[in-house]
Amino acid sequence: MTELKYEIKPITAENHETVNGDCWEHKSELFETQEILGFGAWNDDGCIGSLHCYKVSIPDWDDSLFPDYGRRQPEYWPLGWPLLAAKEKQLSFSGPVWGHSCFHVGRLINTHHSEPQYLGQGIGKALLAASINWAKSHEYSAIIAIGGSKTVPEYNMVMGCLPYTTYANNGFRVAALEGDGKDAPWWAQECFDAPTLKAQAEDALQKNDIENMCARLMVLDL
């Protein structure tokens, strides 16, 4: 595979129109409450990947600027379950928290799928590294994110998240586990009508490997 050259930059009021924003609503209002909307990867073809982020407070948060589906069904939203889990575990932080919502690697503007030539190029890890450095330098108290399944990679693709092992390798701790690792996650039954996800989930269930299939609440204390 030819090495792809790209530049990671914050998503700002000046460049956000060039970023795939399917999951965004209330963009103009968000810029009134947080400095940036996350990070993007740009090359000659435009923005080829993004990480959407939200400034939140924990344990109590204001969901008024979350996407509509994120408010109605938070478990379907990548930042929704981490917020619910943090509240259930009674986590609290002294200052604002930088919440990772969704990664869209290979998603060009006005498209609804990932272009395969942009996958496996380290874009997700580069977006993560940039987000960590930015939050550290902007006086955030922590970063929270959903760490995806170890054994059901298609869940991570559908949900738009990185595996929990990637977060762990970057200093994040596990603060909660779906179903405490004992019960199969809700998505193992629903599977979003995705055949590959269903097959991978069924395989993990047959192997009774529930703990490794479950997602995790990942926290980086800053």
Image (tube, rainbow, N blue to C red):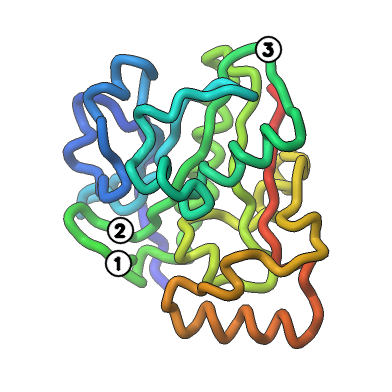
- Real-space Cα distance between discs 3 and 2? 35 Å
Front-most of residues 45 and 2: 45
With 96 as the anchor, is 36 left or right in this view? left
- Mark nearer the N terminus (1 vs 3): 3
As helix, strand or loop, the secondary structure at mark 2 comes to loop
Q: Nearer the viewer, mark 3 or mark 2?
A: 3
Quadrant of the rendering where the C terminus is positioned: top right
Where is residue 14, by image quadrant?
top left
Q: Residue at x 46, y 60 (%)?
A: 121
| Residue 141 visible (yes or no) | yes
Q: Which residue is mark 1?
A: 113
First-in-chain label (2 vs 1): 2
Q: Which residue is mark 2?
A: 107
Position of residue 61 measured from the top left corner of the image (x, y, whole percent)? 52, 24
The reply to whether callout 2 and callout 1 are in contact (CB within 8 Å) is yes
Residue of label 3: 94
Mark 2 surroundings: few (<14), some (14-19) or many (≥20) residues within 10 A: many
For marks 2 and 1, give the CA distance: 6 Å
Q: Residue 133 at x, y = what percent?
A: 56, 27
Q: Who's the residue at 43% across and 30% down the image?
A: 63
Q: Secondary structure at mark 1?
A: loop
* Labels 1, 3: front one: 3
Q: Amino acid at mark 3?
A: Ser
Evaluate whether residue 135 shows in this view. Answer: no
Q: Amino acid under label 2?
A: Arg
Quadrant location of residue 33? top left
Within-10-Å neighbours for mark 1: few <14, some 14–19, many 20+: few
| Quadrant housing residue 17 | top left
Calculate the distance from the C-alpha at mark 1 to the C-alpha at mark 3. Answer: 38 Å
Between 18 and 150, the one lying in front of the other is 150
Mark 1 in CB contact with mark 3 (< 8 angstroms): no
